[in-house]
Image: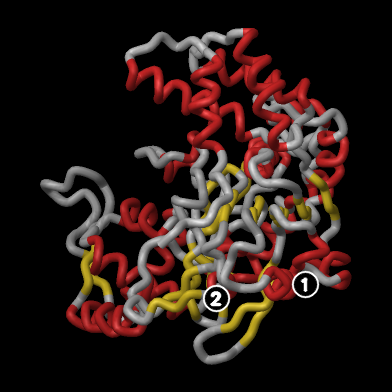
Amino acid sequence: MNMQSSAIMAPPAPRTIDDMKLSPVMMRDIVLKTLFRKNTNKVTHLARAVCLPVPVCQEIIDMARGQGLLEAMGTLGAAGQVSNEMPYQLTDSGKARALDALAQSEYFGPMPVPLEGYREQVARQSIRNIQITRDQLTSAMGHLILPEDLISNLGPAVGSGRSILMYGPPGNGKSSISNGIRDAMGDKIYVPYALEYAGQIISMYDPIVHSKAAEDAEDTTSLRRTARFDRRYVLCQRPTVITGGELSLDMLDLVYNPTARTYQAPLQLKSSGGIFIVDDLGRQAEPPQKLVNRWIVPLEESKDILALQSGEKFEVPFDTLVIFSTNFHPNEIFDQAALRRIFFKIKIDGPNQENFLKIFALVARKKKMQLDEASLVHLLKTKYPTINNIYANYQPVFLIDQMIAVCDFEGLPYKMTPELIDRAWSNMFVKDEKIVK
């Protein structure tokens, strides 16, 4: 049975300060900094800002009041008050403490989740707990024309949550297949706004990577639903991180912000519970072997090792389906030890003539290019023999877009002709010749 979002155990909302498993000083300082930066004075507003239940936020406020850092601005039910909430403000000592805390770290807002607590949530929503059925994968790939045996090979690979290497000639849909795998995972997971380790804050939630579930959008009644789950987490679609030739080893390390004095989670940690796609492997500045060596421990032991500015190293969960995609033959870029660490190797070949024509017809219909039998015969019998009848999935889109560009310029109707085929074909390949300088 496929794991749906309702089957994933949500992180329970904390009921007391003790449930937070954070330093009382850190919690107090984040509340003081949030009060200082957001200029709010109501407990419900502050609780929403720091993503805590009102009773827990009130405990922290009471602790700060006892230390002379906060003071009440009136009494409950005082004349002129719109609500029956007690407003609070920073005392002079509280402002001084807030400024001192901001000098140490600019972080304020959602209270972080301790790393140990996050490990427990990762186990509840592990990518390896998902079971993808043939129907689900076929449905997600429905817009693609694929070889008959490809779904049979992909299914077990995706369902395992292990690493996948897709290789083959360029332009045959490896990136599209990777995106289809992502689309097949329809459930949701909980992503923390930030993690805490050894007193350091690591920002996790990234709107570019994480797509917030519609039902988790903020509204004015959200605080009344805090019992549903810990609001320090965001309910999101399973994340997908896609990198290409720009990927470098330092992008897999913690990023320290010297101004804010906080850390940004690396890409593979942000993709926890989802997919990390390394596209165009072999085009990066780093050798492919070196990149894969960086993944050996995570791939084998489901844990990664990160380092703080101080040099202290610590373990974080590695719960990611890693998909490597390359146009090179694996034996050209890896040794056998590295290949052994990649669990599934799947070759993605170009289409045969029958599938090529299916793709061509689908693209033509979508782009409203009228097909012509004589033009197709010209394409198959005259043009493709010049490249040994090697078909690729990208070619129909390329050729039809070229023909449309010509039609638009010449004021012609969108109807294929042998002449249009010739003009489109001339732009698909560059003649191998020497340029005289």
Image spot of residue 371 (x, y percent): 58, 10
Image spot of residue 52 (x, y percent): 45, 57
Give the quadrant of the C terminus: bottom left
Name the foreground residue: 235 vs 210.
Answer: 210
Residue type, mark 1 in image:
Ile
Residue type, mark 2 in image:
Asp
Image spot of residue 410 (x, y percent): 34, 18
User: How many labels sit on residues?
Assistant: 2
Mark 2, residue position? 250
The residue located at (45%, 41%) in the rendering is: 224
Image spot of residue 374 (x, y percent): 63, 9
Name the foreground residue: 109 vs 423.
Answer: 423
> Closer to the N terminus: mark 1 or mark 2?
2
Q: CA distance from mark 1 to mark 2?
A: 16 Å
Mark 1, residue position? 296
Name the foreground residue: 28 vs 5.
Answer: 5
The residue located at (55%, 68%) in the rendering is: 266
Is 421 rendered above or below residue 323?
A: above
Q: Does residue 213 appear anywhere in the picture?
A: yes
Q: Secondary structure at mark 1?
A: helix
**The disc label shown at residue 386, or none:** none
Is 92 rendered above or below residue 71?
A: below
Q: Colour scheme in the image?
A: secondary structure
Residue 68, image quadrant? bottom left
Residue 184, image quadrant? top right
